[in-house]
Amino acid sequence: MTLHAGLAATLLVALFATSSVRAEFGTPYITPSHPVLGETVSFNIYQGGCDGIAAADAPEVTQQGSYIYVLAQGVRYTNPELCTLTYGVATYAIGAYPIGDYAMQLDLRYPTIGGDFVTQTLGVVSFSVLEGAPIAAVEVPSLDRLGLISLTLLIILTAALRFAERTRVESNETELMLVPTATSPIVSARCPSSTRQKVSGVAP
């Protein structure tokens, strides 16, 4: 292997190693995605590897009208040996706002090797604050063992009462069908005339 070929191979390995650990910031977004009046808005951004926001320094938030500027302090390492930042989503609260439409610009301020500072815009997010209040989660109480038994007995008792009432109604209807009414015709049994004459002993 020639010197030039060996040098080229070394540069390729170094370039591959650098690119494998290099991580760019993700696209920033806000939570909640549809904030309402009174809710605190937070920005979120994926980071890790070589890039990260300093957790100890709270971002500086300024506002001009409906435009919100967020300046975060962080780092962007170029040395692969320093690219050991934990991967994950960084979340920082920026405040609550009145009803209206807004745009949030997230800037990162980080130092360079020469000691200077660079400010880079990571993204701009538009959002609207709507009228209303956050809907609180309502916890529905669950039945314990005693409550479940009581509910089961209540269902059984209700079904038994309905069955007894239905049986009583059907029994009354059957009795009414068996009793003759006042308008029913009364048929009298009349003996033939010949029979009457023999009984009375009178000759025809």
Image (cartoon, rainbow, N blue to C red):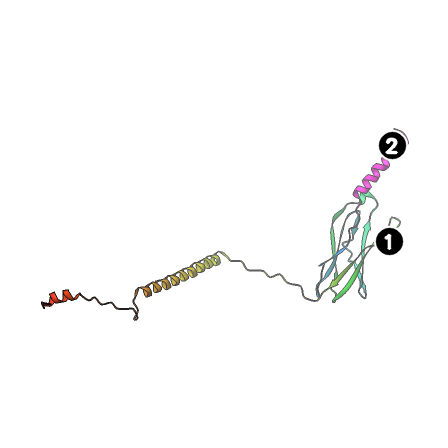
Whether residue 105 is situated above or below residue 5 in the rendered picture: below
Mark 2: secondary structure: helix
Q: Is residue 11 magenta?
A: yes
Residue 24: x %, y % from top left: 80, 48
Q: Is residue 123 magenta?
A: no
What is the quadrant of the C terminus in the image?
bottom left
Dot placed on the residue nearer the N-terminal end, 2 or 1: 2
Quadrant for residue 132, please give it.
bottom right
Quadrant for residue 6, please give it.
top right
Q: Is residue 52 left or right of residue 142?
A: right
Q: Give the camera-side residue of 142 and 48.
A: 142
Please give the name of the residue rendered at 81% of the width and 40% of the height, measured from the top-left corner.
Answer: 17
Magenta stretch: helix, strand or loop mostly: helix
Amino acid marked by disc 2: Gly
The residue wearing badge 2 is 6
Residue 10: x %, y % from top left: 85, 35
Crowding near the residue tagged with mark 1, few <14, some 14–19, many ≥20 C-alpha atoms within 10 Å: few
Residue 126: x %, y % from top left: 78, 60
Report the magenta residues as a range: 1-27
The residue wearing badge 1 is 118
Distance CA(mark 2)–CA(mark 1): 36 Å
Please give the name of the residue rendered at 12% of the width and 67% of the height, measured from the top-left corner.
Answer: 197
Residue 55: x %, y % from top left: 76, 54
Amino acid marked by disc 1: Val
